[in-house]
Amino acid sequence: MAPKKGLLQRLDEGPVIGDGGFVFALEKRGYVKAGPWTPEATVENPEAVRQLHREFLRAGSDVMQAFTFYASDDKLSNRGNESSKKYTCRGINDAACRLAREVAEEGDGLVAGGLSQTPTYLSGLGKENTQKEFKKQVDVFVENKVDFLIVEYFEHVEEIEWAIEVSVKTGMPVVASMCIGPKGDLHGVPAGECAVRMAKAGAHVVGINCHFDPFMTLEGLRLMKAALDAAGVKVHLIAQPLALHTPDAHKQGFIDLPEFPFGLEPRICTRWDMHKYAREAYDLGVRYIGGCCGFEAYHIRAVAEELATERGRKPKASEKHDMWAGGLKMHTKPWVRARASKEYWQSLKPSSGRPFCSSMSQPDKWGVTAGDSTLKQKTAITTDEEIAELAKPRRVMNGK
Amino acid sequence: MAPKKGLLQRLDEGPVIGDGGFVFALEKRGYVKAGPWTPEATVENPEAVRQLHREFLRAGSDVMQAFTFYASDDKLSNRGNESSKKYTCRGINDAACRLAREVAEEGDGLVAGGLSQTPTYLSGLGKENTQKEFKKQVDVFVENKVDFLIVEYFEHVEEIEWAIEVSVKTGMPVVASMCIGPKGDLHGVPAGECAVRMAKAGAHVVGINCHFDPFMTLEGLRLMKAALDAAGVKVHLIAQPLALHTPDAHKQGFIDLPEFPFGLEPRICTRWDMHKYAREAYDLGVRYIGGCCGFEAYHIRAVAEELATERGRKPKASEKHDMWAGGLKMHTKPWVRARASKEYWQSLKPSSGRPFCSSMSQPDKWGVTAGDSTLKQKTAITTDEEIAELAKPRRVMNGK
Amino acid sequence: MAPKKGLLQRLDEGPVIGDGGFVFALEKRGYVKAGPWTPEATVENPEAVRQLHREFLRAGSDVMQAFTFYASDDKLSNRGNESSKKYTCRGINDAACRLAREVAEEGDGLVAGGLSQTPTYLSGLGKENTQKEFKKQVDVFVENKVDFLIVEYFEHVEEIEWAIEVSVKTGMPVVASMCIGPKGDLHGVPAGECAVRMAKAGAHVVGINCHFDPFMTLEGLRLMKAALDAAGVKVHLIAQPLALHTPDAHKQGFIDLPEFPFGLEPRICTRWDMHKYAREAYDLGVRYIGGCCGFEAYHIRAVAEELATERGRKPKASEKHDMWAGGLKMHTKPWVRARASKEYWQSLKPSSGRPFCSSMSQPDKWGVTAGDSTLKQKTAITTDEEIAELAKPRRVMNGK
Amino acid sequence: MAPKKGLLQRLDEGPVIGDGGFVFALEKRGYVKAGPWTPEATVENPEAVRQLHREFLRAGSDVMQAFTFYASDDKLSNRGNESSKKYTCRGINDAACRLAREVAEEGDGLVAGGLSQTPTYLSGLGKENTQKEFKKQVDVFVENKVDFLIVEYFEHVEEIEWAIEVSVKTGMPVVASMCIGPKGDLHGVPAGECAVRMAKAGAHVVGINCHFDPFMTLEGLRLMKAALDAAGVKVHLIAQPLALHTPDAHKQGFIDLPEFPFGLEPRICTRWDMHKYAREAYDLGVRYIGGCCGFEAYHIRAVAEELATERGRKPKASEKHDMWAGGLKMHTKPWVRARASKEYWQSLKPSSGRPFCSSMSQPDKWGVTAGDSTLKQKTAITTDEEIAELAKPRRVMNGK
């Protein structure tokens, strides 16, 4: 049997499809706690993590990202998270790699180990401490022989440069992806400059994940591409956006929207939004096309179906999904059969069924970022008094 | 070990929580085809069906409904559905029962076998033919010793009476639930009369599932309760609504909404909607409280958390969900921690992020129902010409 | 010159078009104060009142309603209204009649004198006191030889019966119109019963004005018509609705909507809404078709244009308005010329340009009405402390 | 009696308040035809024009703009407009000046003569022909001794430069205002550059009117101010925006929105929007603050009330409007009295009552401008065949 092709070769040959979001999907399924968002499910409920990997593989994902999001030791013990008492970064990440590998081998998938931003950086504890956290994670990935590394979900280009620095030492391909939008990083570094700095730090693929919807993410990527071209830097691009509409998000993305994280349902993208996203991403030259929070298997399948010609194949899960709503030809009601067309679904503007809700929200605007004292993290859980204190600014703002 | 308590005893003692929707969830995960909506996944991908059962059990469901929706032989071969070439009603239902039993025994769950409306009835082929389809399904449930039967998703009270008639002969408890709203069945029988007729046909529990949102469903149940009280009939009530907002739906429910089935995302209920639903259902006297299409594990968990006091326990999945957003106390951003309160989420009116979409839609209004020639079913798949013909009325209506 | 035809003869022969709203239009133009809403402008700025009458005449109104709304003495001195210090009911009403007559004679218009509900009734001061207020107004109308009386804007059928009683003694035709919706009067009397009682009290024309949008008003009229038919009572029907969309209004109408009275703009009806309203009203058998608050000249013109065939003429103001947007054929931009069609405007769903606003509101629900102590009126102006006290319930409600 | 202060002195001393829109207001009142939008009402119905001037004077306007919009001879005869058969540019403009003067002298108002863009320019007939049209109008203004000239509603900076050139020769103060937004003129000239070019052509006041809502207009003015500052040019700024929300408008403004001109109602600004606008305009340094289409007297009054302290006076019409809804203290219903506060109205997000409409629209995108053959004007009216042909592109676009 020929060895699997590596990530960079695949990207050169055509689009590579990423997977979708784990923390949001597993929170809804009951295995991840919103707030800390840590991935101890790899140890506690491996069958649930395995099943989600399988859904993405079946939907067309070429990559199984080990479920290691926020699995740094400093995050596992942050603000009363009890995970650190039971598990270590090493234990969780090790289990994650094995689950991803197991499913990847059921198909032709690659396994990626992932790093993300740290409370250590946010609390202003400096480069050495921050890289120490990264190193612990990377060591596990090396031991598990993952196919490549993905450093993602960074709000500050400085921190991702530190992460890339640690990652490239492994010799593995490094994908670097910030959770920023067209307005750049939280310290005011423009999106284009972020891209160039990630590439110069050694990343082989650079781009954006999470925090913004597919179309705002592509706006950011357009700026990145222009800056990379201007700087004469050649790297591949990655997009892994939210599956949530966020036209009203400010610089910090959906975190600031009042609906985050328990009222985001009306923003969920349809499969048809994803056809549009996949086409626009491909046309822009993005070759690593996946999703982040909110992206479920059927969203990934829509990406894979849109790019079926470019990839020369449809995903396994299309067995249960005729292109462009073709399955509706089998519906018992004639007026539903009448909807079995591309034209119908492309032009539909779906209603929310919520006449008492508006279409856009005013994001919170705290405007603080790494280095600000309110962002210093701690291991103790937040008290009710602290919560009451935090809730005050909103009341003042709304009262105005 | 003491034998499990039966359904009726449980209902007498307090609220029983149903499970959520299988066809919608498994369609998104890639295992069910929208259009035919048949459950051959029980044979093809048992691990996916098993995992979904487990999520509901973990979320608080007391019932594992065997995944037998639309598994009658006439539906498996309808309009080009190829399932009938590979599987029989018997095979699919048998596998469904075994999967449900397996997971039910991981907890204290009951197993229900389910019947739903048939193409045979819709095509006007009469009582004998229709009951023959039901009988084939019921036989499998009897062999598998399910704990009770649930006849659900019927648009016409006449057909559900026939189904109840077949079901009661088994001697098992029978739950009967129509997919109607406050305006009654598709032949114009009022909701209250439907309830009384179901009870008189022998059902031990009567109510409504699917087709309408939680609050319209409860409106229908209010009418049913009033009619049952007026008729002096004592039965328990069941509600298993959509997890989709449908204030704009007409008599036939969400099927007629232009977003059905591939553009319903903006209508998805939040967990806070489900707290409200569970409380209102309980206060109305409904004791079997579950969900249908769109209901995922976290919706069921919200029902179980709202009724935690009445039930004397929280579900297993609450390990990963502190009541009323308490987990947000552990979030790194202070303004997100500020959202860790019941007041915040109860008063939130979530935006759609879709400024080009309206909040309500005009449903299709074909107004045809069982007996109409356009509803005669056939085994051949619909042709493109037929689809084009069907799409015409909409164009005319929109052009007006 | 033949004498003008009277109201009843005109109604028998075909549709009579009423005028639009004075208080809202003149408030925007700067001549009426929102809050008291009293018509001292007839004395203070007669040219402004005359001009508004002319606009309606030109737009097709057959009736010039003297601007006497809320001009009872008890209202002129209510809650700090200073009008009573300068003017009397008699003076204001007298001026109003002369202005209406002056413009009516510029065309073929009829003059109507109007009565509306009183603070005296609301404060529970009884029939005798209330009728005394009506009598003072009616006397002026008799002296001014108006063509008919219109008793309108009553929330309680009891009070309008008292007003009709006073009015019929004049021997003039009496039109009686309540500001109620399909749910009936504020004391719980059904809409149909209100209609029958108004007719039995002697009114020649009965119906609904103000408080609800055209389509909810017609729903109320449908109920009135059915009850009148059932009671075998033959009278003409009048509709004079708001030119504001109020699908979210409860029993008390737009007064309870949070936007009343200074944020109603997004609810304003288009001329095309009025074509639809006029057609539906006519088809229902309503023969006195006009408008109330928010109805401007162009809305009345739309009613007159829709009924041009039935009336055998178009209004004068159609000189400046080719039917169904025909004037756009003369626009300089080709894409605007492309909108010169009935089809275009009939199918347009106009956007609000307000993505941060919802489409429906939650009305205030105080649920108090005549007889309740909080509705006792007084002559002193409300103090700031009283306002602060009144604002509390909302805060509590919203805080929940 | 001291002579009136001139415009420039007034601007140096504090804010000058403009008037509102005439064509939209008089179209609704029945005196102007939408499509041609020409002001023959000055001759046909002078009392209607006079009354509107009075409303603005009473509301606080310091300027009576003679109603001469689009009164060039080439416009009066364009596309079947019959006005040219009855009236001349000279006759209409002369009457307009006399009406404005008459009302201005009822207060302390200034009279402005106005020029706007021409079909001659749009049809590509060159500078000489275009300036000939302007000259005919300016001559009338000189004869009528207006206080200053206002050249406004130009989409192309080239044409307004030609108009300014003609205007400055009179020696009168010249106000120059383009109907553009933040994206600049229709030939791609940035907003800032337009401002500098208008100033360099000799205008004493430069800015923006019409086509965009108050807040987008101020965005454009921010760009203009920055460019003027950078160029070291000192002139005053004028803002006269729409009273319509247009966040969805593209470069060509509200003309392209599908609601233009007969479905714009849901976009109408409230008085509270105008408080906000007036404050932001003043803070930005704009000193000529008025309105254009949709601006009615009560909108101007809101501007004057917001700036009452800066101007040392409230407008006459505030006799009928206590600041910040104070008049509601006199309302009969206690829950409406509870709304008598600034806080209430500032935080209100008004609903549309239109659940079937979206909040934003897709503008038409023809993207053609001066010089394009489809914009060549002609005197004959457009035929039905031509309209049908024009309507095709939309159908194709929507059909996609």
Image: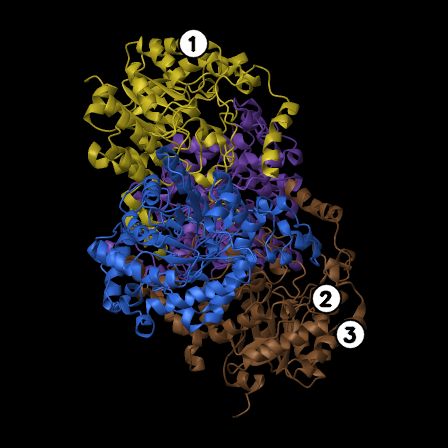
Chain colours: A brown, B blue, C yellow, D purple
Mark 3 or mark 2, which has the lower sequence index?
Answer: 2
Residue bearing mark 3? A132
- Say which amino acid is labelled 1: Lys
Q: CA distance from mark 1 to mark 3?
A: 87 Å
Residue bearing mark 2? A86
Determine which of the numbered discs, if any, sits on residue C127 in the image: 1
For disc 1, the chain is C
Percent x, y of residue D49: 41, 34
For disc 2, the chain is A
- Say which amino acid is labelled 3: Lys
**Residue C250 is drawn in which quadrant?**
top left
The one nearer the camera, B377 or C10, is: B377
Image depth: mark 1 or mark 3 in front: 3
Percent x, y of residue D220: 57, 54
Give the residue displayed 46% in from the left and 62% down from the top: B25
Image depth: mark 1 or mark 2 in front: 2
Vertical placement of residue C10 versus A265, above or below: above
The one nearer the camera, C291 or D293, is: C291
